[in-house]
Amino acid sequence: MSRRRRIAIIVAALAVPVGFLCVVLVDNVMTGFGACHVVRQKLYASPSGGQLVVVVWKSCGATDSTQASIVARGRTFSPESTPTFVSVRGHLEVVVAWSSERAVRIGLIPEPSQIDKREQRAGDVAIVYE
């Protein structure tokens, strides 16, 4: 086998795995740009302990938000599948005070500059913002 032919076979044999690694690397980098990071801040139990307000900070690229959800105790909180009742821009402090099993008061410190979502109810729980 000629030297030129051996070099061509080696280059061809190396091109496939190197190309595959480049595709995997680019895919991982591009996936990272759209990834969100969720950090759970606090849990606030209702008077009986049957429900929880879960407060999280969410960072998606250049967008940071503070969100809150209500979940039943014993259920797993998932940022992808648990609906939020409030979502505001920035990382704010959330003050939660349950009035009863069916009512909760929410305060946001400092006052949010942009409110993306602000529901008055989450399931059977009434929400009052102060």
Image (spheres, grey):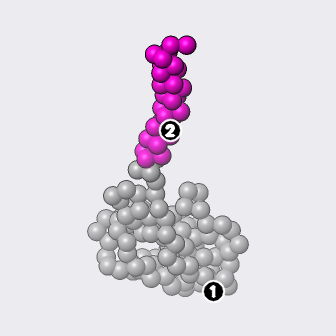
The crowd level at tag 1 (other Cα within 10 Å; few <14, some 14-19, many 20+) is some
Closer to us: mark 2 or mark 1? 2
Residue 18 point in image, percent of width and height: 49, 34
SS class of the residue under badge 2? Answer: helix
Indicate the quadrant containing the N terminus: top left, top right, bottom left or bottom right.
Answer: top right
- Label 1 sits on residue: 47
Residue 105 point in image, percent of width and height: 48, 80
Residue 105 magenta-highlighted = no
- Label 2 sits on residue: 21
Closer to the chain start, of discs 2 and 1, is 2
Q: Is residue 94 visible?
A: yes
The crowd level at tag 2 (other Cα within 10 Å; few <14, some 14-19, many 20+) is few
Q: Residue 4 or 112: which is nearer the viewer? A: 4
Q: Residue 46 or 102: which is nearer the viewer? A: 46
Q: Is residue 56 left or right of residue 89?
A: right
On screen, residue 97 above or below 5: below
Looking at numbered disc 1 in the image, what kind of residue is underneath it? Pro
Which residue is found at the position 31% from the left and 65% from the top? 114
Q: Which residues are magenta?
A: 1-30
On screen, residue 110 above or below 58: below
Residue 51 point in image, percent of width and height: 64, 76
SS class of the residue under badge 1? Answer: loop
In which quarter of the view is residue 66 placed? bottom left
